[in-house]
Image: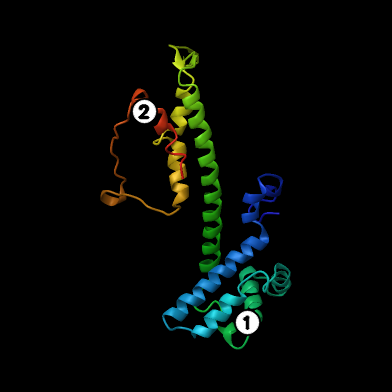
Amino acid sequence: MSLLCPIDFRYGRPKMKGIFEEESRLQRLLDVEAALARAEAKVGLIPEPAASEITKKATTKRVTVKRVQEIEEETRHDLMAVVLALTEACDGDAGKYVHLGATSNDILDTATALQLRDAIRVVGEDLGELTNVLAGLASKHKRTVMLGRTHGQAAVPITFGLKPWRSSAPKSGICSARRSARSPKHSSRSGRSGAPRWRRRKTRSPRKTSARSLGSCGRS
């Protein structure tokens, strides 16, 4: 069952649901703790051997969901249970450097960001497949005539290929979403006082777009 919604287990594909399962969540928490240790070792805050040991043990094979749950029953603190479980898994005195200088939200929020990054990549792959299908339909039916519609009533004839083209064209919403999925990082362009800068873009007529360009967004 997902920690985000009690009915999420009913819906979704295994690939997407797997990202948000408890063991996957734990692994990302451990990944963040290991990355923190390596970063601190790099700047001399903790010994290099300690960072290596923490990284070696920061896996769900060494720190199990079951053990974390046992500790959480005592501590009543989800992340502290992870920290203590990782600490006891480390050999020597490496355990005392686990979570050094961090707060709970530092680890929790970063782990969530990693889950969302992986989920976005899955969505991006799906958008690529969808774009290829739409581009294929656009090319196949570029001369298939159909009735156009406007305001819920019949309009001048159009080609059926125009409809999937609008969704698969390089400047379409689907393509924009896929580009964002390929590089899921925040970016913005602002004007004065943080106001967004808007500019009008010239759009190319569908008649001037070749069938080859219809599939350009779908290519990896």
Task: Residue type at mark 1: give it.
Answer: Cys
Residue under label 1, please give it. 90
- Give me the residue at 46% from left, 78% from top: 40
Q: Nearer the viewer, residue 50 or 81?
A: 50
Task: Residue type at mark 2: give it.
Answer: Thr
- Quick check: 201 left or right of 136? left
* C-alpha distance separating marks 1 and 2: 60 Å
Residue located farthest toward the left when viewing the structure as drawn:
192
Q: Is residue 40 visible?
A: yes
Q: Quadrant of residue 82?
A: bottom right
Element carrying mark 1: loop
Residue 153 at what x, y percent from top left?
49, 12
Q: Is residue 150 visible?
A: no
Q: Quadrant of residue 69?
A: bottom right
Reading the chain from its start, which is encountered first: label 1 or label 2? 1
Residue 59 at what x, y percent from top left?
63, 70
- Give me the residue at 70% from left, 70% from top: 64
Residue 128 at what x, y percent from top left?
51, 41
Q: Residues within 10 Å of mark 1 (few under 14, many from 20)?
A: many
Residue 182 at what x, y percent from top left?
46, 50
The circle drawn on residue 209 is 2
Q: Nearer the viewer, residue 2 or 73?
A: 2
